[in-house]
Amino acid sequence: MNDAIRLGDEVRDSISGFAGVAAARTVYLHGSSRIGIAARAVTKDEGKPYDIQWFEESQLLRTEP
């Protein structure tokens, strides 16, 4: 389990390319794990943070060691 994403890691979704910081983890009863990613950017209109986006842990790539 050394390859598991840790909260605070910089990650990128291998399918959509969405990138940010791993901010939350949800583990479901059947064993799948989803990671909530918080983008580093803010909205152009209001300057507010984007909503956290959720992705399957298996499709995420760590972008820094």
Image (cartoon, rainbow, N blue to C red):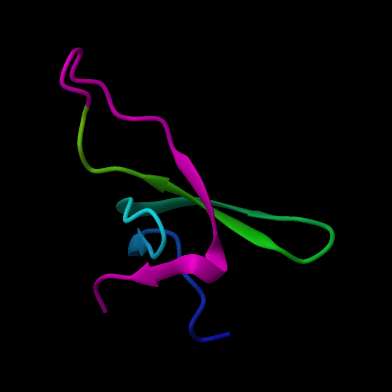
Q: Nearer the viewer, residue 45 or 27?
A: 45
- Give the residue displayed 34% in from the left and 71% down from the top: 62
- Residue 29 falls in which quadrant of the image? bottom right
Residue 2 image offset from top left, x and y in percent: 51, 86
Q: Nearer the viewer, residue 56 or 3?
A: 56
Image position of 4 with respect to 28: above or below: below
- Residue 46 falls in which quadrant of the image? top left
Q: Is residue 38 left or right of residue 64?
A: right
Image position of 43 with respect to 31: above or below: above
- Give the residue displayed 47% in from the left and 70% down from the top: 5
Q: Is residue 30 left or right of residue 26?
A: right
- Give the residue displayed 55% in from the left and 70% down from the top: 58
Q: Is residue 36 left or right of residue 64?
A: right
Residue 18 image offset from top left, x and y in percent: 33, 51
Q: Which residues are magenta?
A: 43-65
Q: Is residue 22 magenta?
A: no
Image position of 3 with respect to 51: above or below: below
Residue found at the far right of this picture: 29
- Give the residue displayed 58% in from the left and 85% down from the top: 1
